[in-house]
Image (tube, rainbow, N blue to C red):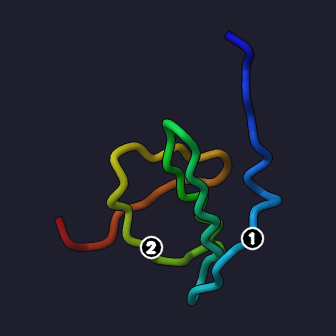
Amino acid sequence: MKAKFAHTALLPGLEVPGAVLRPFAGEQLMLLRAESQAGSLLAVHEQITLVVSGRLGRSGSS
């Protein structure tokens, strides 16, 4: 199987307060690349979250 890839940083983005969202959909994949500013609070509700740089923190609620 030949490897396929995409440069998600080059995708058009939707700017929301504190972040840029870059959605991508392929034949067998749906992905949302979220780039947030340091200290921003974003809802993480995806099935899998991969942090490329920085870190995720939790808000006060559980």
Which residue is situated farthest in the left direction here?
62
Residue 39, horizontal then vertical, whole percent: 56, 75
Q: Secondary structure at mark 1?
A: loop
Q: Secondary structure at mark 2?
A: loop
Residue beneath the point at 43% across and 60% down: 57
Residue beneath the point at 64% across and 80% down: 14
Name the residue carrying label 2. Answer: 42
Residue 58, horizontal then vertical, whole percent: 35, 63
Examine the rendered structure and indicate whether residue 10 appears above or below residue 50. Answer: below
Is residue 32 rendered to the left or right of residue 8?
left
* Disc ID at residue 12: 1
Give the amino acid at mark 2: Leu
Mark 2 crowdedness (10 Å alpha carbons): few <14, some 14-19, many ≥20: some
Which one is earlier in the sequence, the residue at label 1 or at label 2? 1
Towards the viewer: 19 or 58 = 19
Which residue is situated farthest in the top direction here?
1
Q: Quadrant of the N terminus?
A: top right
Residue beneath the point at 73% across and 28% down: 4
Say if mark 1 contacts mark 2, CB within 8 Å: no
Towards the viewer: 21 or 11 = 11
